Amino acid sequence: MLNSVVVRIVDFCARHRWPVILLGTLFMVATAGFDYERFSITTDVEALISQRLLWHQRQLAFAEAFPQNGIVAVINAPTAENAE
């Protein structure tokens, strides 16, 4: 059954090749225009996650209370002179 459907589709496309090529080209141009107008991506992690989620609100409050201003390192040594 599937074989006969595929054969009929291929036969139709072979008999009507120019309209099929034209229709495919028009479809390609239309989808490229749609993608150009509508598709966008953001790398802002805060914009990717909904602001209404409770855990995200807590995370934002934590980040506001304890801002990260660069890299922080904790050095553990018996005395300050031994720390490298």
Image (cartoon, rainbow, N blue to C red):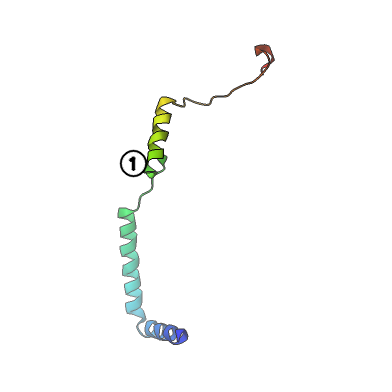
Mark 1: secondary structure: loop
Rendered residue at 38%/81% (across/down): 13
In the rendered image, the quadrant that contains the N terminus is: bottom left
Compared with residue 27, is residue 9 higher up or lower down, i.e. above or below? below
Res 81 quadrant in image: top right
Rendered residue at 40%/83% (across/down): 9
Pick the front one: 80 or 40? 80
Few, some or many residues within 10 Å of mark 1 (<14, 14–19, 20+): few
Amino acid tagged 1: Arg
Rendered residue at 64%/20% (across/down): 76
Q: Position of residue 28 (x, y in %)?
A: 35, 66
Compared with residue 16, is residue 73 higher up or lower down, i.e. above or below? above
Q: Is residue 59 left or right of residue 35?
A: right
Q: How many marks?
A: 1
Q: Position of residue 10 (x, y in %)?
A: 42, 83
Pick the front one: 39 or 55? 55
Q: Is residue 83 left or right of residue 61?
A: right
In the rendered image, the quadrant that contains the C terminus is: top right
Q: Position of residue 50 (x, y in %)?
A: 36, 43
Q: Is residue 36 left or right of residue 10?
A: left
Res 55 quadrant in image: top left
Pick the front one: 34 or 69? 69
Residue at the extreme front? 54
Res 58 quadrant in image: top left
The residue pinned by badge 1 equals 52
